[in-house]
Image (cartoon, coloured by chain):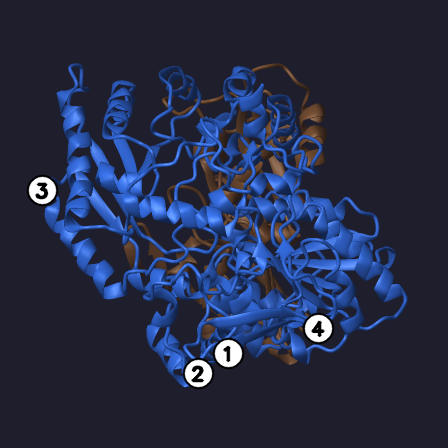
Amino acid sequence: MYPEKLEKFLLKVQKPGRYTGGELNSVIKDKREVDIRYAFCFPDTYEIGMSHLGMKILYALVNAREDAWCERVFAPDTDMEAVMRENDIPLYALESGEAIKDFDIIGFTLQYELCYTNVLNMLDLAGIPVRSENRESLTPLIIAGGTCVCNPEPMADFFDITLPGDGEEVTNELIDLLKEFKKQGKGKKEFLEAAAQIPGVYVPSLYKVEYNDDCTVKSVTPTCGAPEKVVKRNVKNLDTMFAPETFVVPFIETVFDRTTVEIFRGCIRGCRFCQAGFLSRPLREKSPETVFSQCKAICDSTGYDEISLCSLSTSDYKGLEKLLGTLIPWGDDNKINVALPSLRIDNFPKDLMEKLNTVRRSGLTFAPEAGTQRLRDVINKNVYEKDILSTCAQAFAGGWTAVKLYFMIGLPTETNEDIEGIARLAQAVVDEFYHMENKPKGKGVSVSVSLASLVPKPFTPFQWEPQDKPDVLTEKQDFLVSCVRTRKVNISRHVPWTSFLEGVFARGDRRLCSVIETAWRSGCRMDSWEEHLDREKWNAAFEQCGIDPFFYTARARSFDEVLPWDHMDYGVTKKFLQRENEKAHRGETTQSCREKCSGCGAARLNGGECNELCAAVV
Amino acid sequence: MNSVRLWYKKSGLAIYTSHLDMNRCFTRAVRMAGIPLWYTEGFNPHPYLNFLLPLPLGTGAEKDPIDIRITEDISFDEIKSRLNAVLPGGIEIVAVTEPAIKVSEVAKAGYEIILEFLTPEEACAFAAGALAVIESGELNAEKRSKRGIKTVNLCSFVSSFDASSEGGRVKIKAVISAGPAENLNAALLADSLLKEFGASAEKTEITRTEIFTADGKIFI
């Protein structure tokens, strides 16, 4: 429900269905009967937030408790923000329509760095001071989870707590503690000190950061008994882990308008640029039986006709064949389409392709990531040109005529030859189509190359690497375009400046808090939307705060530098990452966990157990 | 295979759901309700679901028709109760019937337009003015169509019109052209009338109340 005051403005904003609530399966409780009110905030628009699986999980998890009510909040688009500000309508939660400033917990999920200004903007729209130190009462408690909290430092001044790792267990522990402290009438400081004792809870204000003269971090010192290292939370068993049996079904179309069921967490591959792969280790799989029953339950309660299986690398799922053996026939009977994203090009079996063809055909996307074998070895992608070409040939033979290929530029050790290699590989895929004996008459082929730029991220072997400056990336993009000789290949490129800003925050420290606040106060928000990203305002904010952004991106770091996120522990050790970095520079690959354990260190989070280790021993 | 006509009511929050989103919403609802819907047999099979007269965003409906086809016999009462159990708030099936008149015969629709003004005087003056304008037979407005924007006389779309005021509220009952051949959005009529007098309403509520054929029979 929305505040009554808003009604007369609703038809004046774009897609009012984003702001009304009342969707199927949204949870309405009696506020007098709950102890904790939780506002789950997604710092981007409704269509993006409603596609996010993590929100669906935590929404169902908190609402499964009788003593708590979780509601959803999204960032209003700029037209709606203007209406809210002009008419003094504070940010409200979609279920109750009530202002969130009176809630107990306001939790953000940080999925990408460019949403940071949206967090500040949402707090401000809610009427809540953005800085933790300016919020004196126990509630609302402002917390955050999600990928980006692996380096929470650029947002350290704003959040009371961040939660690295899996949220399923720690969310409940935190709610329990807050409920108790609220009942006893205790203050915020006492609460934060107690919360810091829960494993996987980081309270930024309890850590003191000192810097060297060259602006690098000298030390991070815990105070008030907070742990030296905050170890990310890891749910050991995915079969017994909480999983939602129903989702809120939006009225309006969202980015991923379908059900999503997770099949495993972690990744056996170790591509050296991939942060998600390292952050989510060790590998933990759900059994095919659990996945199937969750798929059925969710489709029954939402009416969706498409299921997407979610993981970092679907074809690495050991139970895939068994799962598809039951899932696909069931999908055929019920007219439900099964989508398998994140397939690897080197293990995409032909019969799998045929099975996928039965209900509705979606596009084929593969990610070679680099244009030459040498560079693919550097990033440890472990796919070969012959695999790429034979899989594409298979796809063409199966009737596909469009293939999308993902590449990255700005990779360590990259030369012009590697960039040219992208064009060459795309051309080879086109040629593969025309070499086909029974190619369909009158049909052309289309190869879309999507060109991203490497943003070195914390907890990857590339965390020490310099990032290409925007003008260098633009030159490389232009060079690639000049190498393409056919209209069958079309190239879409990312905005280099976006990658630059992302890079600043990804590996930033606490000194960036003031930059983010300054930029936001000068009007920056929705920075991930190209039409809203305002370079001049950002540049002015860096200048005003006396900070050189290239200090964070363009500089090569030494292995012995204290990194701003060193007090976070995601399982993988710094030693392992260093080893992988050195191997990258030697052009050596590392085998997947399934072939050989590389000793990343993440198994200790699972009590020393790792899916893959056990399998190797047995 | 049987053709079935569903009649739904759209009110409250649901009026902010666009036509395309309504389509998705009903597709999911019939799936959840376990109604054996007929799927098109093309390359990409999709459920056959035909909204006879799409509603503009922001307009409600008392009783609007959707045609579906089902592959197994199932009673109309059963269809109605199963769908109502799974439809989101604001969307309700009010009747299920056999289609009696062809879609192509839809020609007009009746609307109720409620406008709220700050003062009773303003409301009273507007109601009288609106009646006079329609009576005069000329109310020009820019109308958007697939062929672009052009100025048309809205009165030529109006079959009947009545406006009355009570306190600060003006209630308009109008029957205007509807259907694929000639269609007028009731919101455009309301806005044009407001513009004519330089007035602005605090709140506007538009509901489609019934649908008619060319000779004025109620569409069933």
The answer to whether residue B1 is left or right of residue A240 is left
SS for tag 2?
loop
Residue on which the image places disc 3: A485
For the image shown, how many numbered marks are present on the structure? 4
Q: Is residue A253 visible?
A: no
> Which quarter of the figure is the C terminus of chain A placed in?
top right
Circle 3 marks a residue in which chain?
A
Q: Nearer the viewer, mark 2 or mark 4?
A: 2
Q: Identity of the amino acid at label 2?
A: Cys
Looking at the image, which residue is at 54% across and 17% down?
Answer: A322
Chain displayed in brown: B
Q: Mark 1 touching mark 4, by CB under 8 A?
A: no
Q: Mark 1 touching mark 2, by CB under 8 A?
A: yes
Q: Is residue B198 visible?
A: yes
Q: Mark 3 touching mark 1, by CB under 8 A?
A: no
Circle 1 marks a residue in which chain?
A
Q: Which mark is residue B167?
A: 4
Q: Which mark is residue A545?
A: 2
Against A502, is B23 above or below? above
Q: Earlier in the sequence, mark 3 or mark 2?
A: 3
User: What's the distance in space between the residues labelled 3 and 1, CA to CA?
Assistant: 47 Å
Against A367, is B73 above or below? above
Q: Position of residue A319 (x, y in %)?
A: 54, 21
Q: Is the same chain shared between marks 3 and 2?
A: yes
Residue on which the image places disc 1: A514
Circle 4 marks a residue in which chain?
B
Q: Earlier in the sequence, mark 3 or mark 1?
A: 3
User: What's the distance in space between the residues labelled 1 and 2, CA to CA?
Assistant: 7 Å
